[in-house]
Amino acid sequence: MSIFFIFIFLPLISAVIVPLLYKYLNRLVHTGWFVLLVPLSIFIYLLRYIPDVAAGNTYKYSLSWIPSLDMNFTSYVDGLSLLFGLLISGIGTLVIIYSIFYMSKAREALHSFYVYLLMFMGAMLGLVFSDHLLVLYGFWELTSVSSFLLISYWYERKSSRQGALKAMLITVLGGFGMLAGFIMLIMMADTYSIREMIANLDVIQGHALFIPAMLCVLLGAFTKSAQFPFGIWLPDAMEAPTPVSSYLHSATMVKAGIYLVARMTPLFGGSSVWFWLVAGIGIITLLYGSLTAVRQTDLKAMLAYSTISQLGMIMCLLGVGSLAIYFGPGDSGTIFTVATFAALFHLFNHSTFKGSLFMVVGIIDHETGRRDIRYLGGLMQVMPITFTIAVIGGFSMAGLPPFNGFLSKEMFFAAVNDVSGAGIFGLGKIGLLFPVIAWVASVFTFVYCMIFVFRTFGGQYRPEKLTRKVHEAPWGMLFSPVVLGLLVIFIFFFPNVLGKYILTPALTAILPKMPISSYDLKISAWHGLNMELIMTIGVIVIGIFLFKTKKHWVQILRNYPQGLTLNHLYNQGLSGTEKLSASLTNRYMTGSLRHYLIYIFAFFAIVLLSSLLLLHGIQFDFSNNAAISIFDAGLVLAMVIAALTVLFAGNRIVAIVALGALGYMVSMFFVIFRAPDLALTQMVVETVTTVLFLLCFYHLPKLKKSVERIPFKLTNLIISIAMGLTVTVLALSANGHKLFEPISSFFENSYKLAGAKNIVNAILVDFRGFDTMLEISVLAIAGLGVYILVHQRSKRREQHETE
């Protein structure tokens, strides 16, 4: 096994080790110091790939898992996966340092916290480095499960449980849609590998399932990356501890959908449907998030909606950049290649400034006991370092120099201006909406950034409104946001270091057929007096005006009818679903065994008979049937008599013996059909079950003898006849249809395949080994459950007798 897999699986391995060593470690130091070694070592290990990947090299590693099903963990290290791997491990390192000082080892269940965090980190690493679609899906859903555990970490709070449930429902449902899309892609390309799919583009793009697969994949990406209208889970997820918010919702989980869109762009890019969905939903999400963030009073909620807005901006850039595949190499292709480059640049920038801002909010909450801006103000006097970090992060998010957000925001303006004149996919005048919406959203982004900085740190200091005596945060909590803040400034002055070694290789992975090396992808802060600069100046002027006059117009946004909000629609939908399911359940869960059998048998008969009739599946062919001998007829008659005896026996022992006799006669049929192994197996099973029945019924009270007239029920007769007819017709029709070669010839070769002389044993142990193991597990669990129930009943009886 390659050392690469050791580092990729290191978080998952550590998640198993932490609970074992937690008590010992926690006595010595904060558990976080041990956990810190995990992302730090991964980050250092991944750094060694930067020079080679920047030079155009890629690496493929394969770990055998289920080779017979072509299920292997195939990892691919290219520019895109390396970019995300560095973000996951690098931001993860800073978040864990921050959490050591934020999470108290005396009051918090740190072993649970770090296990969940490591699970999530391992799932994200597995996701971004997977080349196998189904393995990628497995890690995708593991991110949903681990994020559910992280969001509900403070599970005693109702809001935490509800936020975790909302995130789980939306992202997992989207994940199911994505799985359907993956299965369609596998069917089209006849491979599980993303690389091989990209190599067979002609087969996929000309297939009838191309658009359905695209829609399903985008459903998963949009739900995970909180795109409109699925972004309602992200603000509720802010109930998680601040280190979780800083990690999941700025650098990792919400970026998983961005990663998926970027990775699938070579497959679906160049299509009008892909462009309109990705770019269109992205620009709508940008506007929706910025408008909603302005009216928030909770700092975390404000950052949550700002994250939705910024993710929309990145998604829009990826959609616009996909036009490079449509135009191909050339001037037009170059323009839209830059849009994809801008998406990657802003993705990195967003992780830096948003991570620092979440940490700033955590510091404010930790030191003041408040997150509501209506109670805050004047904090720059007592928290000057925190204020400085907030200015760097906030101004960068607003798109102001000298911070990295300004550079990627200018590139965003250039991209939407270019797409307005693309003249394809029916853009025309509609294309003008892209720069207009982008500019309006940027104005409101500027406004909420100013609110965040100046309403929190400016104005009058009001200690009486706070719950704690305020002072600057300890160095441990300041270290991580300071590092991110310095990175924000460094990237502004030296952006092309990042561009050359990190962003350009990632761009090559997204647009593999574009000659990236021949393009001049230099990032510059000054491009002269152009439309982008004029738009920025307009954002600042109008933004300052709106910020100063906020109290006169913000109430308009806050008075938006709650009945029309997406959250209200979600709550009503969830409530309605629960009421409907409760109503249906109360209708059929009557407590009557007869009713349950009626529902089951009626459904079974109606569905199967209808299917056979509609699909013309009823076909009887007796030409190849063997002749019925006197022995066969006699056994059938004896079986009917035994079955009737079981039904009408007045004594349990007689019923058990008749049931055993019925089983033994079935085994006699196997003898007649020359299947002695199967007959022996059947006899052993019948003997064991009969003995067990006798042991159980021995301890039950005797049946009370009573004479009752059982009323005739027409419903029972109809369902019984329908059920018998269905099974008979189904069996005869199945025997009459020979669509495929029988599988018996495969099992007859059991000695060569499995080294077994007994075919039945080979089927149970080798060919259906997993099935048999699961059946044994179910029986063991059921047995333990019965034992526990009996034991508890005996224990309660003893306690009652003692009292």
Image: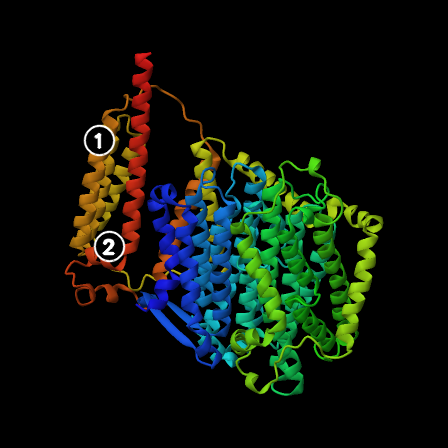
Which quarter shows the C terminus? top left
Q: Earlier in the sequence, mark 1 or mark 2?
A: 1
Q: Nearer the viewer, residue 362 or 20?
A: 362
Q: Which label is found at residue 512?
A: none
Within 10 Å of disc 1 (Cα), the crowding (few <14, some 14-19, many 20+) is: some
Q: Nearer the viewer, residue 335 or 361?
A: 361
Q: Which label is found at residue 694?
A: 1
- Residue 609 position in % (x across, y down): 46, 52
- Visible in this render: residue 3? yes
Q: Which residue is mark 2?
A: 764
Question: Does residue 34 appear to the left or right of 637 in the view shown?
Answer: right
- Residue 149 position in % (x across, y down): 48, 47
- Residue 733 position in % (x across, y down): 38, 58
Amino acid on which disc 2 is placed: Leu
Describe the element under mark 2 as helix, strand or loop.
Answer: helix
Residue at image point 68% right, 71% down: 412
